[in-house]
Image (cartoon, rainbow, N blue to C red):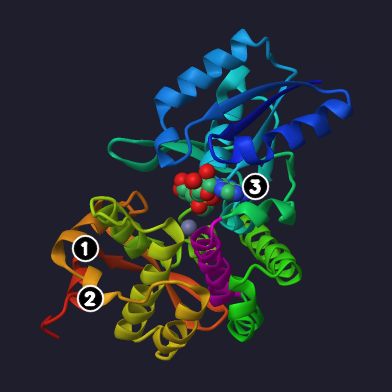
Amino acid sequence: VRLGLISDTNVGPLHGARVRAALERRGATVSYFEVPAGEISKSLGTVAEVAEALAHAGLGRRSALLALGGGVVGDFTGFVASIFMRGVPYAQLPTTLLAQVDSSVGGKTGVDLPAGKNLVGTFWQPRLVYADLSLLATLPARELSAGLAEVLKHGVIADAELFARLDAQAEVARAGDAALLGELVAWSCRIKAAVVGDDERETVEAPDGGRARLNFGHTIGHAIEAASLERAQPLKHGEAVALGMLAAARVGAELGVGDPWLEAQLLAVLPRLGLPTELDAWLVPEVLARVSVDKKRTAGGALRFVVVDRLGSSRTVSVTAGELAEMLLPGRIK
Ligand SMILES: NC(=O)c1ccc[n+]([C@@H]2O[C@H](COP(=O)([O-])OP(=O)(O)OC[C@H]3O[C@@H](n4cnc5c(N)ncnc54)[C@H](O)[C@@H]3O)[C@@H](O)[C@H]2O)c1
Ligand SMILES: [Zn+2]
């Protein structure tokens, strides 16, 4: 079988040769492609370059792709797999905790446009997700913490026991304990697979909010993440999600439907996971103005906003960006 192995300039040099050798030992013909590390590679330009390279290397309809990397390589490779030769199979070998617990599962693929993140993409399920914990040994501590934010999110929206486990073992998880991380990866994947399995295409009609519940913390988190890219110290996606979860907890409480203790519970655990809590510094009009360009709006201009009624239970409600700004900006009129 002909395989296209795709990685980035950080992960390729660390783990590419080992993976390639393992595949070749099993008789595969492997062509290797490397994209620059970072979100910058999630672009249509890179899609065109890699597709061209695949074609030149002789990959065809019977070939398969393999994504070796974090969420960037996974989203990008999945997208290329969905359109190359009208679609070829692919597998995920996630190398960040975030990719192992979140982005490699669920089949959302895509790239960014200058107009915004993930604006072009497909649903294309991987044939296989192989999360090898030993790959995390080389992951920077900050990236590990960013992944733990998504694990915590899965607990908050769907499983109070997972939240409690991570709360009790925060320092152990942050230190990269392999046994605990293994448990958290499997637990997170089960939750995400169950939520996605009930609502693969994130249809607006899903009664409890469906797949959209996975966006908890992401409406305001994405706005903060985008704003931070213009600062000297940009936030990691997971760090912005941590702040977004704090904001969402506050909004839920303000709406009178969310757990009033959630913000305090999050404030207690986030620093122990190495995640930021300085939400108020980001609650300025310039940041909140970015919420309205989020693509997850419904037709009427309202957003599907995820609220947690109690730990482990969540649903979506409809709010406008204006209402969010009113609830979150300091000095607001109630
Ligand atoms: N498809 C989905 O459902 C979904 C869900 C969540 C996030 N995402 C996407 O995932 C992306 C973020 O993923 P990410 O946080 O994994 O970012 P990433 O892929 O950019 O990886 C983060 C950094 O870590 C490096 N790295 C990766 N693995 C490493 C390892 N084992 N050792 C050393 N360095 C390593 C990478 O080169 C990069 O510099 C975003 O583009 C986001 O939109 C997609
Ligand atoms: Zn996320």
**Dot 1: element:** helix
| Res 328 label | 2
The picture places residue 230, in percent across and down from the top left corner, at: 23, 50
From the viewer's side, name the closer residue of 240 and 140. Answer: 140
The picture places residue 123, in percent across and down from the top left corner, at: 56, 39
What whole-number distance in Å separates the C-alpha atoms at marks 2 and 1?
A: 9 Å
The picture places residue 101, in percent across and down from the top left corner, at: 62, 59
| Quarter of the image that includes the N terminus | top right
Q: Which residues are magenta?
A: 140-158
Q: Kindly indicate whether the residue at mark 2 contacts the one at mark 3 (C-beta within 8 angstroms).
A: no
Residue 96 sits above or below residue 310 on the image: above
From the viewer's side, name the closer residue of 226 and 16. Answer: 16
Q: Is residue 134 left or right of residue 292?
A: right
Q: Earlier in the sequence, mark 2 or mark 1?
A: 1
| Quarter of the image that includes the C terminus | bottom left
What whole-number distance in Å separates the C-alpha atoms at marks 3 and 2?
A: 35 Å
Majority secondary structure of the magenta segment? helix
Q: Is residue 202 visible?
A: no
| Res 288 label | 1
From the viewer's side, name the closer residue of 37 and 328. Answer: 37
Give amino acid for label 3.
Pro
The picture places residue 275, in percent across and down from the top left corner, at: 44, 71
Disc 3 under 8 Å from ligand 1? The reply is: yes
**Mark 2 closeness class: few <14, some 14–19, many ≥20 residues within 10 Å:** many
**Mark 3 closeness class: few <14, some 14–19, many ≥20 residues within 10 Å:** many
| Res 94 label | 3
Give amino acid for label 1.
Leu
Q: Kindly indicate whether the residue at mark 1 contacts the one at mark 2 (C-beta within 8 angstroms).
A: yes
